[in-house]
Image (tube, rainbow, N blue to C red):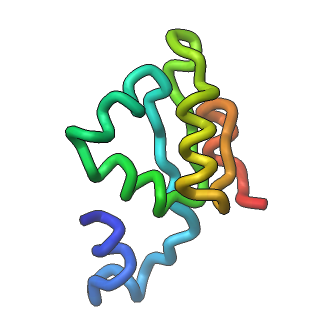
Amino acid sequence: PLLHILLGHPLVVSDYVLDAVVCTVDAQHFLASREQHAELDKQAAMADRIVLTKRDLADPAPAAAFLATLNPDAEFAGDAAAAFAPLR
């Protein structure tokens, strides 16, 4: 819903420009939660940059492999600071 407002609401589009969509993905629970929450895939598929969180609690490789297939054009940021760096 927020993305739709930024892309098309007449009171917003004249003052703001969407530069990128950053999506945080929980490496611990993402894959198991996809069946119950279809919006997870939609959000990750629309992202310009993906940040895998909870990397200290779970191996991020399975989620990263799936996300690379779902959204091959997304950049992966290693941490929160990298999430807000300029896009390449």
Quarter occupied by residue 62: top right
Q: Is residue 62 above or below residue 34?
A: above
Residue 23 on image: x %, y %: 48, 47
Residue 85 on image: x %, y %: 70, 49
In the image shown, does 15 or 74 lie closer to the viewer? 74
Residue at (65, 35) in percent of width and height: 81
Q: Is residue 11 above or below residue 5?
A: below
Outermost residue to the left: 36
Outermost residue to the top: 57
Q: Is residue 17 above or below residue 57?
A: below
Left or right of 22 on screen, residue 87 = right
In the image shown, does 60 or 5 lie closer to the viewer? 60
Residue at (36, 74) in percent of width and height: 6
- Figure disc tally: 0
Quarter occupied by residue 11: bottom left
Residue 36 on image: x %, y %: 21, 39
Left or right of 15 on screen, residue 80 = right
Left or right of 54 on screen, residue 13 = left
Q: Is residue 25 above or below residue 1?
A: above
Residue 42 on image: x %, y %: 37, 58
Residue at (64, 30) in percent of width and height: 79
Residue at (34, 47) in percent of width and height: 40
Image quarter where the C terminus lies is: bottom right
Image quarter where the N terminus lies is: bottom left
